[in-house]
Amino acid sequence: MGSSTLVNTLATTTGTIATSISHISIDWFIFAALIVLLTIDALRSGSGRTAAIALSLPAAGLFFEGLSKTAVIGTLFATAVSPLAQAILFITLVVALYFIINRMMPHYDDISGSPLLGVLAGVATAVAIVAVWVHLPFLAAIWHFGAPVAHLFDDPFRLWWILASFLALAFVRG
């Protein structure tokens, strides 16, 4: 009798946990995965790369808006009318700016003794990525964040999220 009660309790608990997890949006799992990957990178090699990623995203947004009006390459951007083509061009611009910004920054800082700083760098960079991602409609061709995440990082709060991300990264790098 005792073992069947334990089995029933475990089955009920497992069912409750499974039901609770099934109500969580996949967006939060993606956000958590970003945080984990960026934290591992920050702990492994310092916060330079995470800071370069966080800086390249808003810069790429500014450049992307201006490139369509630029002489010589403006026609390339004008021909990219589909959201997927715009997303590919934007990601290419982010990668190029990442390499430029990464070259301007020190390559390594010693945060290996402080896992908290690595987590802070990972969270700050993930916040910057999602805040920029939600703002640019053509990136929805790759992944569209649901309403809870979109509302959290949308226009009224986007500037504050990015500013908080930069302040956190400045704290980690300082």
Image: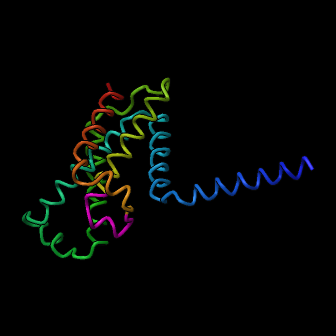
The question of residue 136 being in magenta is answered with yes
Question: Which residue is rendered at x = 24% and y = 42% of the image?
Answer: 160
Q: Is the C terminus in the top left, top right, bottom left or bottom right quadrant? A: top left
Magenta stretch, overall SS: helix
User: 119 left or right of 6?
Assistant: left
Q: Nearer the viewer, residue 76 or 161?
A: 161
Q: 174 and 46: which one is in front?
A: 174
The structure residue drawn at horizontal position 26% and vertical position 68%, both measured from the top left corner, is: 86
Please, is residue 159 above or below residue 89 in the view? above
Magenta segment range?
134-144
Above or below: residue 113 compared with residue 72: above
The residue located at (36%, 43%) in the rendering is: 125
Q: Quadrant of residue 52?
A: top left
Q: How is the image coloured?
A: rainbow
Q: Provide residue 149's location: percent of width, then percent of height.
A: 37, 55
Q: Position of residue 1 (x, y in %)?
A: 93, 50
Please provide percent x and percent y for residue 124. 36, 40
Question: Residue 108: image x %, image y %?
Answer: 39, 31
